[in-house]
C-alpha cells in the first residue's frame, strides 16, 4: 500500500504561517515571495544553536521508509549513524537535508521514494522549529543515476555533448527535474561542469559534456535552465574544475597544475555560465590547485578558492555544498573533526555526507562554542539554505502525492523524448568500406560479446543482453555472450568458437587500456574473418586501442536508452549524428590526434 501525503489542511498551514509572520512584523499582507523571506527570518530567529548546526548537514540514511525501514537497514543505521531511522536522524541531529542512494535502499520505485520523501518532511515539520528538508540525489543520468526505471533515464553528459543540441540538453534537464520533483527530490547534484581534457581521468570522463570549455559552458547553462524550470535546484560541480585529473578524489587527493590563466580559460567558463544562468548551488571539489591556493588544501577547505574566487571574483552568492566528506580526497590532510569546520571557514554552506555525523556535528558545535566559528557565520549559510528551500516552495508545499507520481514519472511522452535525444548522440568513428548499416545484410545472425560492467540505474540488464535484445526487436537473430572487461583466455576462446557461422560480431568495449585483454578479444575475433563492429560503451577513447574492426561506434554509456540508440544506428534505423565532444589521441603517441573534437561519420 502506498503512503498518502498529509492532508491539504496541513500544507495550507505552512503558507498561512508565513503570511501571518509577515503581517505580524509589517502590519500588512505581503506577496508570497516577501512572505517567504519573512518566514525564513522567523525560522532562523527561533532556531537553537543545535538546530542551526544540524541545518548545515546533508546526510545519508538507510531504508525505504522514514519510520519503518527493513531490519537490515535499521541495523545499518545503528552501526553507521547511531539512529534507527531517518525520522530519528532528523530528531537527533536536526539535519537540513538527506541524500538518497540506491545502495542505501532509498530508491526502490517512484511511489516508495515519494512516500519516503513525505515521511522525511513530516519528521522535519515535527521538530521544535519546523523546517522542511532539502532532499538531494546524484542523478546525472548516463553512468551516474540513483533513481531507475520506471523513471525516465536520459543520455548522460558526454552523450549530450556529442549531440550538441542546447535545446535537447535543456529538455533533458527539465524532464529529469520534473520527475525528481514529483517524488520529493528537490536538489539534483547535476550538471557536471568539469571540462574533461584528460583521457586518463578516472572519475569524470563521460560525466563531463566534453573537452571544449565554450561548448561545455553552453550545455551547462542549458541544463541549469532546464532543471530550474522544473523548480529543482541544479548543482554545478565540481568547483573549481575536476576535468584534468589522473587521480580519483574518492580514493586520493588530485593535484591540478593549471596556471591561473589556464584555469580561467579552461575550467572557469562552465561555472561562470552556470552562475549567469542563475544556478542554485555549486559543489566543491576535493582537489588541490596550487595556482589558486598554494597552501596544499583541497578546494573544499580553501578560503582563497571558495570565498576569494567563487564568492568575490565570480560574484556567486548561492548555496555552496561540499562534495561528500566521506571521500578520501578531503580527509588526507586533516582529521574528520576538522574537515567540516574548515569547510565552513572556507565558505561552504552545506556539509555533505560526513563519514561520522556525530564527530562532524559535534565539531561544528564546539567550534561555535569556543569562538572559532561565530553564530553569525552559521547564520550566513543557514539563510542561503532556507532561502533556497523557500524558493523551491518547500515551506508552502513540502509534500508530494501518488497522483502526481502517476501523472509525471516515466510517461510515454518523456520516454519518447529520451529516445529522440539519444538518437542524435551515437557517434560513428570507423566505417570501413561503408560496412554499416548492417540492414544491408540478408537475414543477419549476430553474436554480441563484451564487457558487462555493474549496471547503473538506467539499465535492465547486462549491456551484451541489452544490445542483443535491441537487435532481436529489429529482426536480427542475436545471441549474447558476456566476456567481461578483462576476458580470460578461456572466455576469448569461447567467443571465437561462438563466432563461427555468424554474419557479424558486435563487441561492447569498456575503458580499454594498453594491457587490456579486450584488445586480444577484438583481435582474435577479427582474425576469424567474421566482420566485427565495436561499440565503446563508456569512454570513446577505446577506438584508439582496437584495430581491424569494420566499424566502431561510441555510445558514451551502457544505459538502455543509449545502447538502443547505438543499435538503431548500427541497423540503419537512425543515421549517426553524434560528433566527438573530446579528442581521441593515438594510444602510442598522445600528441597525435586520431579523431578531433567534432569528428563523426555519416552514412552515404
Image (cartoon, rainbow, N blue to C red):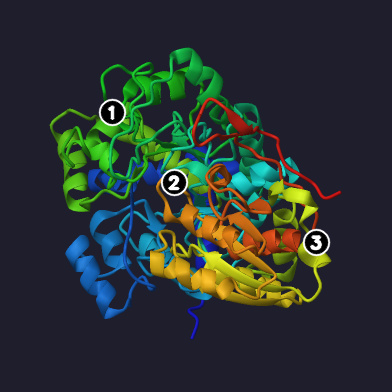
Q: Are marks 3 and 2 in contact (CB under 8 Å)?
A: no
Kindly report the distance in space between the C-alpha atoms of the residues bearing marks 2 and 1.
Answer: 42 Å
Taking the spot 13% from the left edge, 31% from the top edge, the residue there is 370
Residue 465 badge = none
Mark 1 Cα shell of 10 Å, populated few (<14), some (14-19), many (≥20):
many
| Residue that badge 1 annotates | 345
Instruction: Point out the frontmost of discs 3 and 1.
Output: 3
Q: Is residue 455 above or below residue 24?
A: below
Taking the spot 22% from the left edge, 30% from the top edge, the residue there is 373
Kindly report the distance in space between the C-alpha atoms of the residues bearing marks 3 and 2.
Answer: 30 Å
| Residue that badge 3 annotates | 572
Q: Secondary structure at mark 1?
A: helix
**x, y percent for residue 366:** 15, 38
Q: Secondary structure at mark 3?
A: loop
Instruction: Point out the frontmost of discs 2 and 1.
Output: 2
Taking the spot 67% from the left edge, 61% from the top edge, the residue there is 531
Disc on the earlier residue, 2 or 1: 1
Taking the spot 21% from the left edge, 36% from the top edge, the residue there is 332
**x, y percent for residue 596:** 65, 32
Kindly report the distance in space between the C-alpha atoms of the residues bearing marks 3 and 1.
Answer: 57 Å
Instruction: Point out the frontmost of discs 3 and 2.
Output: 2
Mark 2 Cα shell of 10 Å, populated few (<14), some (14-19), many (≥20):
some
The one nearer the camera, 12 or 599, is 599
Residue 179 lies left or right of residue 6; in this view the side is: right
Quadrant hosting residue 76: bottom left
Residue sitting farthest toward the right: 604
**x, y percent for residue 5:** 51, 73
Q: Secondary structure at mark 2?
A: loop
Residue 513 badge = 2
Mark 3 Cα shell of 10 Å, populated few (<14), some (14-19), many (≥20):
some
Disc on the earlier residue, 3 or 1: 1
Task: Tell me if residue 25 can be seen.
Answer: yes
Amino acid at each position: 500500500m502506498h503512503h498518502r501525503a498529509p492532508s491539504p489542511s496541513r500544507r495550507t498551514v505552512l503558507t498561512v504561517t508565513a503570511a501571518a509572520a509577515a503581517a505580524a512584523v509589517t502590519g500588512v499582507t505581503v506577496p508570497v515571495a516577501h512572505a517567504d523571506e519573512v518566514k525564513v527570518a522567523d525560522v532562523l530567529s527561533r532556531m537553537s544553536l543545535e538546530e542551526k548546526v544540524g541545518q548545515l548537514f546533508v546526510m545519508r540514511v538507510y531504508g525505504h521508509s522514514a519510520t519503518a525501514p527493513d531490519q537490515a537497514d535499521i541495523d545499518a543505521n545503528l552501526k553507521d549513524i547511531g539512529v534507527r531511522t531517518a525520522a530519528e536522524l532528523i530528531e537527533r541531529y536536526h539535519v537540513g537535508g538527506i541524500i538518497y542512494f540506491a545502495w542505501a535502499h532509498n530508491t526502490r520505485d517512484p511511489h516508495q521514494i515519494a512516500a519516503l520523501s513525505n515521511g522525511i518532511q513530516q519528521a522535519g515539520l515535527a521538530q521544535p522549529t519546523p523546517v522542511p528538508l532539502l532532499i538531494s540525489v546524484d542523478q546525472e543520468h548516463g553512468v551516474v543515476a540513483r533513481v531507475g526505471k520506471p523513471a525516465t533515464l536520459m543520455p548522460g553528459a558526454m552523450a549530450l555533448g556529442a549531440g550538441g543540441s542546447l535545446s535537447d540538453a535543456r529538455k533533458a534537464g527539465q524532464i529529469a527535474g520534473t520527475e525528481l520533483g514529483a517524488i520529493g527530490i528537490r536538489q539534483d547534484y547535476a550538471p557536471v561542469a568539469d571540462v574533461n581534457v584528460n583521457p586518463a581521468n578516472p572519475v569524470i570522463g563521460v560525466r563531463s559534456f566534453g573537452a571544449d570549455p565554450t561548448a561545455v559552458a553552453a550545455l551547462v547553462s542549458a541544463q541549469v535552465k532546464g532543471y530550474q524550470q522544473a523548480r529543482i535546484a541544479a548543482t554545478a560541480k565540481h568547483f573549481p574544475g575536476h576535468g584534468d585529473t589522473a587521480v580519483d578524489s574518492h580514493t586520493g587527493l588530485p593535484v591540478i597544475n593549471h596556471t591561473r590563466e589556464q584555469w580561467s580559460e579552461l575550467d572557469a567558463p562552465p561555472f561562470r555560465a552556470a552562475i549567469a544562468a542563475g544556478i542554485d548551488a555549486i559543489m566543491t571539489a576535493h582537489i588541490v590547485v596550487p595556482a589558486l591556493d598554494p597552501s596544499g588544501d583541497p578546494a573544499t577547505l580553501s578560503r582563497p578558492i571558495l570565498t576569494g574566487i567563487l564568492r568575490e571574483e565570480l560574484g556567486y552568492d548561492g548555496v555552496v555544498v561540499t562534495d561528500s566528506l566521506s571521500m578520501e580526497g578531503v580527509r588526507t590532510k586533516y582529521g574528520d573533526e576538522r574537515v567540516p569546520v574548515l569547510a565552513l571557514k572556507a565558505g561552504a554552506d552545506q556539509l555533505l555526507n560526513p563519514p561520522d555525523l556525530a564527530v562532524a556535528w559535534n565539531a561544528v558545535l564546539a567550534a561555535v562554542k569556543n569562538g572559532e566559528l561565530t553564530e553569525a557565520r552559521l547564520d550566513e549559510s543557514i539563510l542561503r539554505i532556507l532561502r533556497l528551500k523557500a524558493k523551491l516552495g518547500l515551506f508552502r508545499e513540502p509534500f508530494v502525492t501518488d497522483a502526481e507520481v502517476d501523472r509525471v514519472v516515466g510517461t510515454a511522452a518523456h520516454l519518447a523524448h529520451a529516445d529522440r535525444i539519444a538518437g542524435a548522440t551515437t557517434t560513428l568513428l570507423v566505417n570501413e568500406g561503408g560496412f554499416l548499416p548492417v540492414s544491408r545484410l540478408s537475414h543477419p545472425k549476430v553474436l554480441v560479446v563484451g564487457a558487462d560492467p555493474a549496471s547503473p540505474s538506467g539499465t535492465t540488464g547486462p549491456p551484451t543482453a541489452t544490445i542483443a535484445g535491441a537487435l532481436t526487436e529489429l529482426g536480427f537473430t542475436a545471441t549474447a555472450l558476456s566476456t567481461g572487461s578483462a576476458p580470460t583466455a578461456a572466455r576469448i576462446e569461447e567467443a571465437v568458437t561462438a563466432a563461427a557461422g555468424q554474419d557479424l560480431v558486435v563487441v561492447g568495449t569498456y575503458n580499454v587500456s594498453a594491457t587490456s585483454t579486450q584488445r586480444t578479444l577484438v583481435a582474435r575475433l577479427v582474425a576469424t574473418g567474421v566482420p566485427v563492429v565495436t561499440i565503446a560503451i563508456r569512454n570513446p577513447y577505446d577506438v584508439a586501442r582496437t584495430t581491424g574492426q569494420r566499424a566502431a561506434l561510441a555510445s558514451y554509456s551502457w544505459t538502455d536508452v543509449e545502447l538502443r540508440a547505438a543499435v538503431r544506428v548500427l541497423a540503419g534505423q537512425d543515421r549517426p549524428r553524434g560528433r566527438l565532444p573530446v579528442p581521441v589521441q593515438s594510444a602510442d603517441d598522445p600528441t597525435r590526434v586520431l579523431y578531433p573534437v567534432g569528428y563523426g561519420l555519416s552514412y552515404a
